[in-house]
Amino acid sequence: MGDHRVTAPLASPSDNSSDGLRGGHSYGPDVVSGGPSADEAEPRPQAVAFARWFLIVGAPAMAVFNIWQVAALPAMANERIISPRAWPTGVAVIVALAAVAVSLGALLQRWDMVPKDAGSDIGSWRDVLVTLAAILAFVLIVEPLGYLLSSFLLVSGLSLLVSPTKWIRNLFAAAVFAVLSSVLFAGLLGIRLPDGIIPLPWS
Amino acid sequence: MEELLQGFAVALQPIYLLYGLVGALVGTAIGVLPGLGKTTTIALLLPLTYQLGDPVGAFILFGGVYYGAAYGGSTAAILVNAPGEADSVVSALDGHQLVKRGRAGAALMTAAVGSFLAGTVGTLALVFLADPMVALALAIGPVEFFSILVLGLSLVAMLGGQPVKALFSMGLGLALGTVGIDLNSGQSRFTFGIPELFEGFDFVVVAVGLFAVSEVFVGMSGIRRNLTAGPAVVGKLRMTREEFQHSWPAWLRGTATGFIAGILPGAGNTVSTFLSYGVERTFARPVVPFGTGAIEGLAGPEAANNAASSAGLAPLLFLGIPGSASTAVMLAGLQGHGLPTGPLLLQERPDLVWGLLASLLIANALLLVLNLPLIGVWVRMLSVPPALLYPLVLAVCIIGVYGMSSRVFDLWIMLAFGLLGLAFRLADIPIAPLVLALILSPMLETQTGRALTIARGDWTTFFTHPVALVFYALSLAIILTPVVSGWMRRRRDEAKGKDLSNTPAAKTAP
């Protein structure tokens, strides 16, 4: 094997933390630097409060909704060996038992149910909300405006939001992506993408 | 072996070699990059393969992605301490410490060679397992099948480290799997009169929302504080004789551990890597302590990860049971392409099964040959600005989801599950059990219906089959083991506390 001298970007000690097991991943953490980073040490009371609320109230609420829906299933006129309500009823019992256990664990603060580092991998809640708004806007405009324009607006808008100084690069990349992806997916692979106000010549 | 040779005749066709190569390269790229895991990537490629209309090519492509992601994830975990997926977390423990010790080349070599050996041995073992497993699948009835599914769900719930939360996640997945028209009675369930829900939640839409969109939320939120970078030098890609001597027993142990863990539906790659790390800590005699750059702590889990990837295909291909989220997407792909699942797949489409296994062997060799020389390319991919990466990942998700059905409704569903995925991350609830249970729920209901029909409605039938009882006993053992061990640990700690309080020093203390 040859000598491969390449440089890899290393995360800085101030990077966010993610344990990976939750499927999350950011550019960090660099555990070699030793000790928790500044961001990890930063308390996230709102995120911890949300996690507690979700576990104590949200999980049982989902279970109750499930039971309510199962109970609302109409009974079948003819007698069957297994009715359409049987399996959902069994599942509702599992969900209810698990939800009660999750809720009690969080309420009584047992089994480390509420994660103390909840939200430690969330950098800015404002950016989460703006990303959500951007997706909502995209879903609303994609059919009237068409794929080409909507995808350009989505990619350029989000990249400009978090990196406004690199606006030329972001606009260029968004335009190239919008055109190339529509050529690839609509033109070559035949996937139907909405035309909107700019009909795709290759679709 | 004759069948495998026929498989090579399929896999060595130029177009399928190209599919395998593209899959391996795409898989490595997504393994290196954050944002898209192998599950999401296969899910996004699925609608595209429907357009190609060639299921054999589609599954060879998926096989390349499946193996390539494991290689790519290791590279990011070792060099940058940034595991792209849960499967690579253990590799970062000692792998990145080796980099800090200046042994990056050795770390990459032991990971690559171990992965290659384990992947090859695992795939060859599948060849020999095919006929016995198909015979088993044909011999067992719905009760036994039900009990295997129960075992898989028990493993998913109990081995992730958060059993109660995993049980809740799994329950929600089972509940979501009941949405749609009941095939037995024709009655619609939980559809609220929305025609798009008559066929239930589309598995791919749910998986993309839960995994990828929630990742985009988290990734976008951290960009402004996350852009600094520093250099890491890979150096020469070779191991010393001592490193090799410490690596090869770990490769063998990791291969065995990974294959056994991987073949159990529900255990999957992540569990296999943690088990392998535990095995190494028990049996290996490293030069330096574990956690500080012990090469066994990298070689074993890397081999286990790839062996588990191979073994995980056995329940999918021969029983029709997905053992992990990524194989669940592949099962959805089989169904989407109109192919039979379970033992009938090997009987009706041997070209696909043997072609896939042969292509996996080829992809494994390609990955070893290509990835080490291309290591610089993969590492440079990590320098893609996150400000562009996450919006592009989101746009690709949207194309993938919209492209399947051309329905804006699916984008709303994707977004809803993206938010649910974010809530799950905040509350530290594992996502994989929900995804797996979503696809297992209709299977469980079908098998329950069949078993009860055969038994004329007698529910005791579930407890009168010896093979099923064995699987129930295994499930019970899996559920009770952490409970009993936790209770024993508490008793031991209490006893220690009493002993300490009885010491003279404790008695004289104020």
Image (cartoon, grey):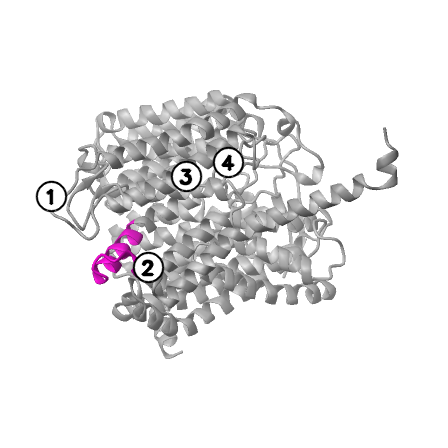
Local crowd size for mark 1, using a 10 Å CA cut-off: few (<14), some (14–19), many (≥20) = few
Q: Chain of mark 1?
A: A
Q: Is residue A41 left or right of residue B187?
A: right
> Are discs 1 and 2 both within one chain?
no
Q: Is residue A39 left or right of residue B476?
A: right
Kindly identify which numbered label has been placed on residue A77. Answer: 1
Eye-nearest disc, 4 or 2: 2
Kindly identify which numbered label has been placed on residue A99. Answer: none
Query: Which secondary structure lies at badge 4?
Result: loop
Mark 2 = which residue? B462
Residue A80 lies, with reference to residue A29, above or below; the image says: below
Examine the image and state in which quarter residue A175 appears.
top left
Amino acid type, label 4: Asp
Real-space CA distance between mark 1 and mark 4, rounded to the nearest whole angstrom: 44 Å
Real-space CA distance between mark 4 and mark 2, rounded to the nearest whole angstrom: 34 Å
Residue B295 lies, with reference to residue B85, above or below; the image says: below
Q: Residue at x 33, y 25 (%)?
A: A136
> Are discs 1 and 3 both within one chain?
yes
Mark 4 = which residue? B428
Write down the region rendered in magenta. Answer: B442-462
Examine the image and state in which quarter residue B499 appears.
top right
Q: Chain of mark 3?
A: A
Mark 3 = which residue? A97
Examine the image and state in which quarter residue B227 appears.
top right
Q: Are marks 4 and 2 in contact (CB under 8 Å)?
A: no
Residue B433 lies, with reference to residue B65, above or below; the image says: above
Q: Chain of mark 4?
A: B
Query: Which secondary structure lies at badge 2?
Result: helix
**Is residue B207 at all visible to an observer of this figure?**
no
